[in-house]
Amino acid sequence: MNAPLRTDPPKRNRYDVVIIGGAMMGSSAAWFLANTPDFTGSVLVVERDPSYAFAATSHTNSCIRQQFSTALNVKISQFGAEFVQNLPAFMGPEAEAPKLRIQNFGYLYLAADDAFAKTLRDSAAVQRAAGAATRLLTPEEIKSAYPFYAVDDLVLGSINTVDEGYFDGITLFDLFRRNARRAGVDYVANEVVSLQKNAAGDRVNSVTLASGEVIACGTVINAAGTRGARIAGLLGIPLPVEPRKRYTWVFSAQEPLDRPLPLTIDPSGVHVRQDGKTTYMAGGHSAIDPAADPTDFSMDPALWQDHIWPAIATRIPQFETIKVIREWAGQYDMNTLDHNAVVGPHDEVGNFLFLNGFSGHGLQQSPAMGRAIAEWVTYGAYRSLDMTPLGYARIRRGQPYRETAII
C-alpha cells in the first residue's frame, strides 16, 4: 500500500541544509543541527509521508545493544544508551523530555556450533575492549540463569545486561522532530524528484520537489531510509541499499515465564524477547530474503506457522501454547555490501551526505549519527566519534567494513 502524497510548499527558495526524509535519522540530524551552537544556517526537512505510517521508524522494535563485531558500532550504541537515558540533560528543559530508561533484559546470542561460538568469543573481546559488559556463558550457565531454555544443542552463549534491551523509541523520535521544529527547522510534506549539480559535477546546487518548487541548497542529506538508493540514483550514484522485509509478532503464553526473557537470538535466526509483563515479541524473516517494494508491508501467513513458532517452542518449551495478539511487517534499509551504515559525504559530490543503510540498527544509532552529521556540516569533520570507516569511499572500492552481528 502507499500513502497519498501531500505536497506542501516550503517557506523559502533556499536553505543551507535540505534533509531528504524526516523519520528517525532525518529528524535526529535536524535536531542536532539546530542545537549545535556554531551552526546558524537554515534547515528544511522534506518528508513524503508526514503520517510516518510507512516509515521504518514506525515499525521498529525499539531495541538497543552493544553486542556488535566492530568497536565503532559498540561506541555508537553506547552513546545512544547515554543519550536515551539522559534526555532532559541533553535536550534541555524547554524540550519537555521525559526520563526514559532501557529495559535491561539484555541480548542473549546462542551458538549451536563451534564456528559461531568463535564469532561470539571474538566479538566479545571487541565489546569488552570498548567497555561493554558482555559475558560468555556455557550451556550449563545459560540453563542455571534461565531454566526455561532447552540447551542440549548449544555450545556457547553471549549476553550483556548493561544498557542493552529495549526502550521507547517512538518517544525519542517525537522529541527529535518536535524540538527540531521548535528550534526553527522547517518540515514540509513533499517529495524530492530530482537533484541538480553544478557545472563541475562536484556539488548539488538545488533540489526539485514534486510540487514543482526548485530549492537552492548548501548541503543535501540523504536520510530517505529504504528509498535511499533511489535518492542517490538521482545523481547517478550507486548505493547498495535495499528494502528487506522483517516480521514481528506479539504473543501471550498460556504459562508465562518466571523471569524476564532476554532478547534471545536463536541459531535458527529467530529472535524473541520480553515485551510486557506477560507478553513476548518474536521476529524473523523468510529464508529467501529478496529486495522488497518499499510500499510492501504485507504479512507472510506461513512464516509464523512453519518457521517462527516452531523455533521458539523448541528453544522454550513453555511457548508451545501461545496466542498471537498482533503482528506487523517492517523493512530494513539493508546495506548489501557489509550490513553497515553509509554515513558522511560522497567522495566526489562533496555536499551530498549519506545517512543510509542501517540494516536494522538505525534507531539505536540515531543519536550518534545525528550528532556526527551535524558535526560534519558545521565543522567539515567529525569531532566526537570518527565515522570515516562508514564513509562512501569503501562503497566505491567495494571493500566492506563488515558487521557480522545482524539480526
Image (cartoon, rainbow, N blue to C red):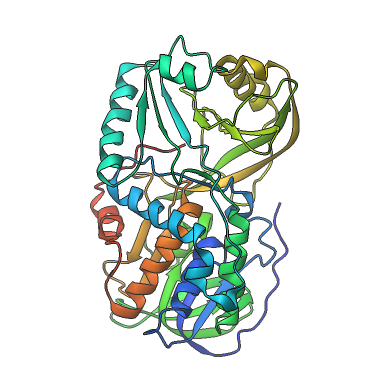
Please give left or right for residue 309 compared with residue 360 in the image.
Answer: right
* Residue 233 appearing in the image: no
Residue at 45% x, 73% y: name it.
32
Q: How many marks?
A: 0
Q: Position of residue 392 (x, y in %)?
A: 30, 59
**Residue at image point 67% right, 79% down:** 8
Residue 370 horizontal/vertical position (percent): 43, 66
Q: Is residue 31 above or below residue 59?
A: below
Instruction: Give coordinates of residue 274: x percent, y percent.
Output: 61, 34
Q: Is residue 395 or residue 390 the one in the foreground?
A: 390
Which one is nearer the viewer's eye here, 79 or 372?
Answer: 79
What is the quadrant of residue 169 in the picture?
Answer: bottom right
Q: Does residue 78 appear to the left or right of 277 in the view shown?
A: left
> Residue 27, how many percent across, how many down?
53, 68
The residue lying at 30 percent from left, 41 percent from top is 127
Residue extending farthest to the top is: 152
**Quarter of the image holding residue 351?**
bottom left
Q: Is the residue 276 above or below the residue 169 in the image?
A: above
> Residue at left 64%, top 24%?
258
The one of 400 and 128 positioned closer to us in this rendering: 128
Is residue 56 visible in this depiction of the protein? yes
Residue 290 vertical placement versus 380 (above, below) = above
Q: Left or right: 341 with respect to 123?
A: right
Viewer-proximal residue among 401 and 92: 92
